[in-house]
């Protein structure tokens, strides 16, 4: 299983077949499809028997570390279990086509409509779009709503600046820039929270919005959130909530009640749909009533017993994605919400917070440093014991069969290990993880040579990440 892993193209043998499609008989394809659309030479596809293909993909999947194989505490990514019931529900809808007459897909529209309603209720917003295909895409959508809102009030030219704390996810400044804003960074205070005085000083008539994550990426709840929002609103500034991980507060507190004007959620985090190579995402956006007219078209509305697409939105920012978003992901999230119910969602947040605090205490006992050592929410940031590097701890974990935590993020903590256990892990799993983390710390301090060369057991060892980023090889090409 180690070392070279030939591609299907390299395994190809001329004339070998898995299946043969039925003959088209005497149909004149050129007449039907247009002669210009016909291939002059056959496509260069690999030729293999079915068993070789099955083995290829099965063996590839076995080289992965994933939530189905092991504990995966990747901070900020909420790698919780993806229930198989949600998969089964999504599989019921695979034969729908987006061009179908809405009358023939009323059940699908009902799911979209009800999911919009559930998410509005969970977040405390007035209207929701399910169109964006990822969290960052939701951020872009939300920032475009804010821009459209300021423009509608004749303040589009004036309000150009977006304030983003230095603990923010990198997608926040990127989305603001893409939506045409200028980003200004707000420093965090010593307590890891946004510095309210710095923020107040940065507010002004040129500021369009503040993007905030709460609990922030240190896993800390911003205790001055109400004052902060009040100060911003007094200056006409809109509040954007990065709700990629709502996992800590779902059912307990609502961003809409805190005063936020717009939010995006990641269904592929909080609502347990697969991600990280497991499938497409979905980043719904919720908005307060004053921003709702700008939402993308179409949304789904209900008239009596019928569900229909609503295109009649004169102030809309337009379409953010083809068709209606990633519908299969919506079905999974819908199933998850219906399975858990309101009480279950609330309990899952409580358990996520409990698990994070349990690990925080245990890892501290095991010698790890906790720079902001207070009650955390769904995640926390640790540092390795003296002399060890976050990267080495992460690589060593691979040899013990665990996916590493997020490392070197947030940027405001040196050697950060950002750990998010989620609610779906048992106490035994957390205890085993602590044992391994303690062992890595002890062994790494005793034997620096050992830890600096980990991992030993993976198909590839330490990668040249700089070259991988600068010169990515994203597809196989035949040697000329
Ligand atoms: C994951 C994440 C995002 C971005 O979500 P994508 O679906 O990866 O685009 C944004 N903000 C935070 C805090 C996140 O954790």
Image: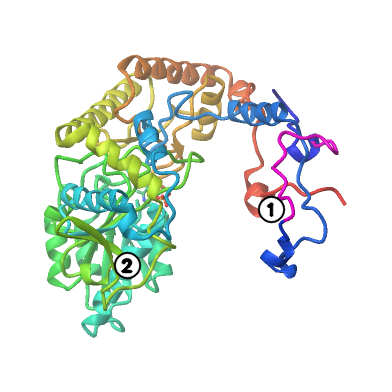
Q: Position of residue 262 (x, y in %)?
A: 24, 61
| Residue 419 at least partly seen | no
Q: Is residue 18 magenta?
A: yes
Residue behind label 1 places its C-beta within 8 angstroms of ligand 1: no
Q: Position of residue 244 (x, y in %)?
A: 33, 48
Q: Is residue 27 magenta?
A: no
Residue at which label 1 appears: 471
Write down the quadrant of residue 51 in the picture. top right
| 239 relative position to 46: left or right | left
Residue at image position (38%, 66%) is 176
Q: Position of residue 464 (x, y in %)?
A: 66, 42
Q: Is residue 445 above or below residue 50?
A: above
Residue at which label 2 appears: 296
Q: Is residue 100 above or below residue 153?
A: above
Write down the quadrant of residue 271 in the picture. top left
Magenta region:
12-26
Residue behind label 2 places its C-beta within 8 angstroms of ligand 1: no
Give whichever of 259, 302 is nearer the camera.
302
Write down the quadrant of residue 40 in the picture. bottom right
Residue at image position (62%, 27%) is 58
């Amino acid at each position: 299983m180690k070392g070279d892993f030939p591609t299907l193209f390299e395994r190809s043998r001329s004339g070998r077949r898995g299946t043969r499609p039925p003959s088209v008989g005497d149909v004149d394809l050129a007449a039907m499809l247009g002669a210009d659309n016909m291939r002059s030479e056959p496509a260069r596809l690999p030729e293999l028997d079915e068993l070789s293909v099955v083995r290829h993909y099965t063996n590839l999947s076995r080289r992965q570390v994933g939530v189905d194989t092991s504990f995966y505490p990747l901070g900020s990514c909420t790698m919780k279990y993806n229930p198989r019931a949600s998969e089964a529900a999504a599989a019921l809808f695979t034969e729908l086509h987006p061009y179908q007459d809405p009358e023939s897909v009323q059940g699908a529209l009902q799911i979209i409509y009800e999911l919009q309603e559930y998410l509005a209720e969970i977040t405390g917003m007035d209207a929701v779009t399910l169109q964006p295909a990822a969290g960052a895409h939701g951020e872009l959508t939300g920032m475009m709503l804010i821009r459209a809102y300021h423009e509608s009030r004749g303040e589009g030219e004036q309000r150009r600046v977006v304030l983003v704390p230095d603990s923010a996810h990198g997608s926040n400044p990127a989305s603001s820039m893409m939506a045409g804003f200028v980003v200004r960074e707000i420093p965090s205070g010593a307590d890891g929270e946004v510095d309210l005085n710095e923020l107040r000083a940065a507010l002004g008539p040129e500021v369009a919005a503040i993007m905030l994550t709460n609990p922030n990426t240190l896993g800390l709840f911003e205790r001055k959130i109400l004052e902060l929002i009040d100060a911003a609103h007094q200056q006409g500034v809109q509040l954007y909530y990065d709700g990629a991980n709502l996992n800590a507060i779902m059912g307990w507190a609502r961003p809409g009640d805190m005063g936020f004007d717009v939010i995006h959620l990641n269904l592929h985090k909080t609502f347990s749909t697969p991600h990280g190579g497991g499938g497409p995402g979905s980043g719904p956006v919720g908005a307060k009533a004053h921003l709702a007219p700008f939402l993308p078209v179409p949304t789904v509305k209900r008239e009596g017993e019928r569900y229909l697409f609503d295109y009649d939105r004169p102030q809309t920012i337009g379409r953010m994605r083809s068709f209606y978003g990633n519908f299969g992901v919506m079905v999974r999230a819908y199933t998850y919400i219906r399975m858990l119910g309101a009480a279950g969602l609330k309990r899952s947040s409580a358990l996520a917070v409990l698990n994070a605090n349990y690990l925080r205490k245990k890892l501290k006992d095991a010698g790890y440093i906790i720079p902001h050592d207070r009650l955390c929410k769904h995640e926390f940031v640790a540092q390795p014991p003296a002399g060890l590097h976050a990267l080495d701890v992460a690589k060593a974990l691979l040899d013990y069969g665990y996916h590493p935590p997020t490392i070197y993020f947030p940027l405001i903590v040196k050697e950060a290990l950002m750990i998010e256990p989620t609610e779906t892990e048992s106490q035994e799993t957390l205890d085993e993880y602590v044992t391994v983390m303690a062992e890595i710390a002890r062994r790494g301090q005793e034997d620096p040579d050992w830890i600096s060369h980990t991992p030993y057991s993976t198909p590839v060892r330490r990668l040249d990440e700089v070259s991988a980023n600068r010169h990515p090889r994203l597809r196989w090409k035949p040697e000329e």
